[in-house]
Image (cartoon, coloured by chain):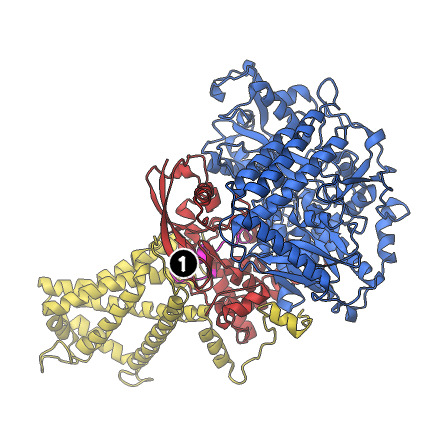
Chain colours: A yellow, B red, C blue
Amino acid sequence: MARPAANDELVRQSGYVPERVRRAHAGNPILALWRALWDSIIGKKVIMAVTGGVLVLFVVGHMLGMLKTFGGSAELNAYSMFLRQILQPALGYGGALWFIRIVLLVCVVLHIAASVELTRVNQQARPIGYNTKRVVETTFAALTMRWSGALLLVFIVFHLLNLSAGVAGFAPGTFDPLNVYHNVVAGLSLWPVAAFYIVAMGALYLHLEHGLWSISQTLGWNTTRNVDTAKRDSRLIALAVAAGFASVPIAVLAGWIR
Amino acid sequence: MKLTLKVWRQQEAGASGRFATYDVDGVTPDMSFLETLDLLNENLLARGEAPVAFESDCREGICGSCGFLINGVAHGGRPGTTVCQLSMRFFEDGDVLTLEPWRARAFQVIRDLIVERSAFDRIVQAGGFISVPVGSARDGNAILVQKESADTAFDAAACIGCGACVAACPNASAMLFTAAKLMHLNTLPQGQPQHHLRTLDMIAAMQNEHFGSCTNHGECEAVCPKGIPMEFIGSMNHDLITAMFRRRRERPPAPDVGKQPYHEIEETGSRSRNK
Amino acid sequence: MSAMLDGGIPSGPIEQKWGRCRFEMMLVNPSNRRKHSIIVVGAGLAGAAASASLGQQGYHVRCFSFHDSPRRAHSIAAQGGINAAKNYRNDGDSTFRLFYDTIKGGDYRSREANVYRLAEVSVNIIDQCVAQGVPFAREYGGLLDTRSFGGVQVSRTFYARGQTGQQLLLGAYQALEEQVGTGTVTMHTRSELLDIVIVDGKARGIVTRDLVSGRVSSHAADVVVLATGGYSNVFYLSTNAKASNCTAIWRAHRRGAFFANPCFTQIHPTCIPLSSEHQSKLTLMSESLRNDGRVWVPLKRGDKRPPNDIPESERDYFLERRYPSFGNLVPRDVASRATKEVCDEGRGVGPSGLGVYLDFAAAIARMSREQVDEKYGNLFDIYEKITGEDAHAVPMRIYPAPHYTMGGLWVDYHLMSTIPGLFVAGEANFSDHGANRLGASALMQGLADGYFILPYTIPDYIASNHLAAIDTSHPAFAAAEADVAERVRRLVGIRGKRSPDSIHRELGKTMWDLCGMSRSDQSLRRALAKVPELREEFWNDLRIVGSGEELNQTLEKAGRIADFLELAELMCIDALDRTESCGGHFRVESQTSEGDAVRDDEHFSFVSAWEWKGQNAPPELHKEPLAFEYVHFAPRSYK
């Protein structure tokens, strides 16, 4: 198919010549695929979609788990113990949990790294902006993905320090690593902490509202016929997840659980 | 009716520009937007000022030459309409309208409302074709094409290459344009032999032109005068993943036109942008 | 009167002429091809197809376009479709029938051999375009769909919705860009041809102006191809794109290429009427509308009632009345003329009185609104977008508009003009449509020339001529460049009061009124007095702001109008000379008592080819006699 170019002069003049010779990456094919993905702006989107998908599965599961707070101390603590005992004795105590934590950490890192890279590309793609620009179809959620994402990152760090490690938001000695129910109620009883949790769930809602259907859009599952349904569904799921989570600090603040 | 137009004026590529404000009187509802600019230009010429440079050719919405933002919306925001077809009956006496050229790193402003869109041509050069030397084709009916595929291919091929998708995209991404050409050719049976190569090459070329990436805002499809749906961007991504899995090749090392200085490209007649 | 022109038609039976000609042509060794350079001006269907094909063969091709991209060429606006004698419908079509229909449709003013060749390669065009990925309409079985178009009795028109031209152009554009990518074709965009360079009697290059920097430069080659389209914009208001112009062919004409049949212009009957004095162009509505719409005007003059208030008894369905057997489906020239006549009688409709109704009420009642929309929905949308009226509720208003020019540079059977080495393709030449072009034939001709004729005839020219190696340092280039620079300088230096557009409008109105749908001795003589006056005014009172060394759209327009002002005069001279009515050319002196055109085969069965004799000398007429061996003269009647 490729014809030899007439001469060098012509090649130079034609401005752009797609180089048809492509080197396969030597060595590991998985690595080669990874590099191809990472080098492509669409590949990075795919990475964001896949890691985002894993994180969505996690938040849904986590939210359902946290609803057990309403079942009382025994139920939530039993659930917490169950998580540490998954696949025991094949894995040691807490082994599966650590595996999940590592997977989630990798996903978060990749998701953020890809988004930072893409944001940089996108900002460079329009060095001179518009004087007047109106948006037509996009949503508040889509326009604020970077901000909701950044807020969520701050929240996640705080949340891990707060309810997982107990080093922030607790007076020394009040955090009990194995009494999750106690920690939740004690931690969220401080209104600034609870308020931050509720605000962060607002950000989670926005991030998921756009992120969920974007996963299927990026992976090419959407069609013009189903895209409206996909958008509606992602709104509903986002709402359910955010409301499910937010119900806990609200209930604590309202004194429904203590 | 009388309108106030705030128009971006820029002498040439790389020069600094500014908005100039003009009043245009005697606009009638049966004029098109470009005819309003014609009228403005006649007035400017009569006053000895340089007319506003803007591109247009067919003036029936098919050649893709025209386009600028009116009050921040590419092509003015009427569905399925380019500025050449935009009727003045949608405007009111006393309206103040801001006219701005497409803005993107890949689309250099070369005068007033005119931008250079040769980046699109280079994306097509990279793979937007089916290689079939003239004379070697089989009978047209020897290739059966499902009606659905033909219709989908047509929907994608309806792209007029105006650049509104890039202009409207918050990220100045050319994915809708690239996806439209890819889906046109990848959907048809004739396009299958070059399916993967084309997908990899065109996407690489798009990236080399320094267009941004897609964040699924949907602004592109909202302003597309031919109603090309975002669905095609998803299909393009899907094709790319498949092509990467199947071929396991890196993207082609195409020359980075964006890094060539303006004057060098200008000499070849296919200029791009400075810096 | 000088010697007769010879079109170089090969001998032999008509169905063997092209095959024999191809065999007899000389070939260029593949390894020698890259040593030869070809300049193609224009990147529409014919230009892009020729560039791509010649690039594939290995020649060094440089393609020039004044657009920012080759995809903008006005071929893109063709709606209806493309003819091909495939006979997929088993309805009696054949190469010979397509040939016959085209000769008859062209009112016996085209060359039999050329038209037969066109019909012959029409089938290859479809195959080529399908293979390129042009998304033609398909049936559910996966086969190509066709429709009947332009009043012919077989279903031979292939189409891609209402945008066939766009899809075919994109096919050719893609093939062209592939060659640009591989380096065989160099694309020069935003470059306008301003002169042709002749060295030792052969076309050896061009002079262009870069439309961004204003720089004038020369380009040398072994062969120059002009594929620069038609000149309908001489009427200012036409369905052509704003930038469509005659400059390339007119510059070539001034350098010695004969201009054939300049008065053969096609006026398309179904366009949206003029609505404001500022209107910049006219929009075509597909001819297919006449399949179901009924054309009428009020019986009374100056009847200003809304159309739906005019009772059936006070309407005149004038096409059905005058042509009972063809009714609303009479050919373009006949429908246009009848429309003009009723408007001239003062029975036209709309604010300007220049329009007739095209009524779908009967079709909607007969079929259903949905069925009508299925067939014409997009056209109703276009109409509503432009006029703001819903054609379901009130009848459309239509009026004829200049659309296509059958005339163009004279070419022989090899598509070479009278300047050796200067080939002309597509609408820019005169070759195949005679005095009237049938629907869905323009796309066919452009692609035939580009894909299947020039790639044979250009190598033959290269192989059979000794072409000395020259470059742009040859004095002829410097001289042409100086001419161009001088002309630009002169245009910019006039510093008068009138804008180019105002003069163009005036020229257009003059030509439309005096050399438009019907022409008389008197009107043409008036035009011949008026056009030079206008030209004088142009060169004395033009105003251009800015210089030639920048992107200057006013200057671009002015240069094109200067050439239109010269071409207009030649059109009138040709129209005056041809005292018969044929096809798009209607002389009021040559008609029946019922107003139908009367052809004069005895005296006018020839091609008029005009030779430029200088600014102040009248052009010289050369005749190429037309012989009709296979299709015999018959009057066209649609009664």
Please state which of residues C266 and C308 is positioned toward the viewer in this rendering.
C266
Question: In the figure, C523 relative to C66: above or below?
Answer: above
User: Which residue is under mark 1?
Assistant: B169
Question: In the figure, C626 relative to B175: above or below?
Answer: above
Q: Residue C200 is drawn in which quadrant? A: bottom right
For the point 12% across and 74% down, which residue is it?
A: A182
User: Residue B30, position in %: x, y?
Assistant: 45, 34
Figure quadrant of the C terminus of chain A: bottom left
Question: In the figure, A70 relative to C383: above or below?
Answer: below
Q: Residue C318 is drawn in which quadrant? A: top right
For the point 48% across and 81% down, which residue is it?
A: A31
Query: Is A202 placed left or right of C521 in the picture?
Result: left
Query: Is C609 placed left or right of A2 in the picture?
Result: right
User: Residue C17, position in %: x, y?
Assistant: 86, 49
Q: Is residue A38 magenta?
A: no
Chain ID at mark 1: B
The amino acid beneath tag 1 is Cys
For the point 71% across and 28% down, which residue is it?
A: C586
Q: Secondary structure at mark 1?
A: loop
Question: Which contiguous range is marked in magenta?
Answer: B156-175
Residue C153 appears in the picture as rendered: no
Q: Is residue B171 magenta?
A: yes
Please state which of residues A225 and A144 is positioned toward the viewer in this rendering.
A144
User: Residue A157, position in %: x, y?
Assistant: 23, 76
Residue C629 appears in the picture as rendered: yes
